[in-house]
Image (cartoon, rainbow, N blue to C red):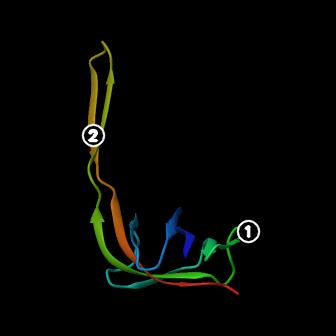
Amino acid sequence: MYVIVEIAGQQFKVEKERKIFVHRLPNAEGEQIDFDKVMLVDNEDTIAVGTPYLKGAKVSAKVLNHVKGDKVFVFKKKRRKGYIKFNGHRQYFSQILIENIELGK
């Protein structure tokens, strides 16, 4: 069984006991969090699609830790103009563990 849920403005395919990285959440480490913006549920080949969300469906998760992603280098250059720009960026992420998936009736 899996669901498509919207977390922090992005859509994720989640299953029970799966760990995923999402954009940094304001919740503290070890805190429970519920996501009610469930868009699709696939339960043993029975698919339910919301318009846009399913009523009563909910995903419960636990925030494991907050981490920084790998460094991404940004390099800009214009030929023959002497323009070179070099920058780096690290995105903040939260690792969450999907604990429970409740289906709406």
Which residue occupies 27% across, 44% down?
88
Position of residue 75 in the picture relative to residue 36 (left or right):
left
Q: Can you identify the residue that label 1 sits on?
A: 51
Amino acid tagged 1: Thr
Q: Residue 73 in the image: x percent, y percent?
A: 28, 41
Which residue occupies 51% across, 66% down?
13
Task: Please tell me in which quadrant of the rendered image residue 62 appears.
Answer: bottom left
Which residue occupies 56% across, 70% down?
5
Q: Nearer the viewer, residue 78 or 44?
A: 44
Q: Residue 42 in the image: x percent, y percent?
A: 61, 73
Amino acid tagged 2: Asn
Of label 1 and label 2, which has the lower sequence position?
Answer: 1
Q: Can you identify the residue that label 2 sits on?
A: 87
Considering the image in quadrants, where does the C terminus appear?
A: bottom right
Q: Residue 95 in the image: x percent, y percent?
A: 35, 71
Q: CA distance from mark 1 to mark 2?
A: 41 Å
Position of residue 21 in the picture relative to residue 69 (left or right):
right
